[in-house]
Image (cartoon, grey):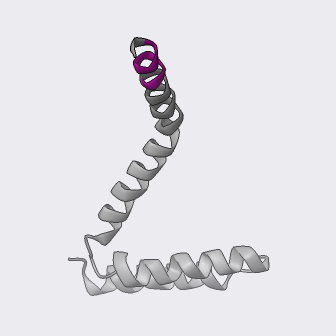
Amino acid sequence: MTSAPVATAAKATVQAVAKSPASAPMGQLRSAFVAYHERYIATGSFQPFVHAMVGAFAIGYAFEYPHIKHEVSHQRAEAAKIE
């Protein structure tokens, strides 16, 4: 766990970043990150690790999907030749 002064300083930094001027979409994104930080990271939750792993899996699968699709279609074509 973090000590109280460190947690307070981190929260003050996050709030200062949230209040900095930005365009509307960036302000919404920044406020979403601030809310995420307060909900998961500041509390020491394990959920950010789980979110990162799920995100890595999803991105990896998205990149690999065309190769998988090609392999399956190739196997089906080979099976059709045999029959």
Residue 40 relative to residue 59: left or right: left
Residue lying at the far left of the rendered structure: 1
Q: Position of residue 36 (x, y in %)?
A: 45, 78
Q: Position of residue 21 (x, y in %)?
A: 75, 80
Q: Position of residue 32 (x, y in %)?
A: 56, 79
Q: Quadrant of residue 31?
A: bottom right
Residue lying at the far top of the rendered structure: 82
At 37% from the left and 64% from the top, the residue drawn is: 51
- Could you say which is closer to the camera, residue 3 or residue 75? 75
- Name the quarter where the N terminus is drawn: bottom left
- Name the quarter where the C terminus is drawn: top left
At 27% from the left and 76% from the top, the residue drawn is: 44
Residue lying at the far front of the rendered structure: 83
Residue 45 relative to residue 65: left or right: left
Query: How many numbered discs sit on the rendered protein?
Result: 0
Magenta-highlighted residues: 76-81
At 38% from the left and 86% from the top, the residue drawn is: 8
At 35% from the left and 67% from the top, the residue drawn is: 48
Rendered view: 59 above or below 5: above
Rendered view: 25 above or below 79: below
Rendered view: 58 above or below 3: above
- Could you say which is closer to the camera, residue 13 or residue 27? 27
Residue 36 in magenta? Answer: no
- Could you say which is closer to the camera, residue 22 or residue 45? 45
Q: Quadrant of residue 9?
A: bottom left
